[in-house]
Amino acid sequence: MVGLEPSCLLTLRDEFLAMGLGEPAQRLASQAFLFEEFLARELAQGRLSLPLRALPNKRALLHGHCHQKAFDAVRPIQTVLALIPELKVELIESGCCGMAGSFGYEASHQLVSKAMAEAALLPAVRSAGPDDLVVADGTSCRHQILDGAQREALHVARVLEQALAPASA
């Protein structure tokens, strides 16, 4: 199983197993990969060849979702983005974006959510150049970045899509 949303997919490798569902749950968990984990695994096994071209953007700021950080799943994003010629990937050293799903949208948590984002993430995004990409796999992370810094963050799959070379006719 290959998934795009870190909080959903990584739940299959953690909370799902705690439910005591036995061998079927363990088999599923062992075969559950984030999109970029799957690509990095295929690359390491020599089974991945992506026809990627350089983008007009030469720098990408990467924000790792909390679940990705907890499961050491940020490195595969860096590995896959490194396949794009001439793209320099910089990890934003930040904690949680502050959204935690719908937490940040709840009125009682909004101030805490914004304060968490302002600790490191949003200032880093605001300091990015206009041609720099902002990459964040988490849906709630992308919403927080858009709401707090008025910048669109892209999922790694969208960045790779932009870098795919046109098919030869």
Image (cartoon, helix red, strand yellow):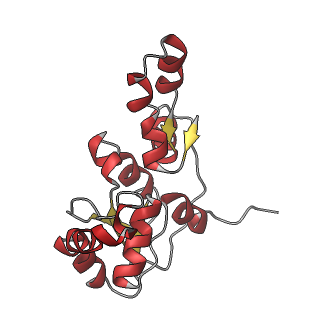
> Which residue is more in the foreground, 120 or 86?
120
Instruction: List the single residue furthest toward the front.
Output: 108
Q: Is residue 127 above or below residue 82?
A: below
Q: Is residue 66 above or below residue 56?
A: above
Q: What residue do we see at 57% from left, 35% from top?
A: 47
In the image, taking residue 158 as reference, residue 120 lies left or right, namely left
Measured from the top left, where is residue 35 in percent x and y? 52, 46
Q: What residue do we see at 21% from left, 68% from top?
A: 116
Measured from the top left, where is residue 140 in percent x and y? 43, 63
Instruction: List the single residue furthest toward the bottom.
Output: 130
Quarter of image, res 52: bottom right
- Confirm whether residue 12 shows in the render: yes
> Which residue is more in the foreground, 106 or 144?
106
> Which residue is more in the foreground, 76 or 54?
76
Figure quadrant of the C terminus: bottom right
Quarter of image, res 120: bottom left
In the image, taking residue 81 as reference, residue 112 lies left or right, namely left
- Confirm whether residue 58 shows in the render: no
Measured from the top left, where is residue 104 in percent x and y? 34, 67
Q: Is residue 28 above or below residue 140?
A: above
Q: What residue do we see at 27% from left, 43% from top?
A: 70
Measured from the top left, where is residue 94 in percent x and y? 21, 63
Figure quadrant of the N terminus: top right
Q: What residue do we see at 34% from left, 47% from top?
A: 68
Instruction: List the single residue furthest toward the top.
Output: 23
Instruction: List the single residue furthest toward the left.
Output: 119
> Which residue is more in the foreground, 57 or 143?
143
Query: How many numbered badges does the structure rendering display?
Result: 0
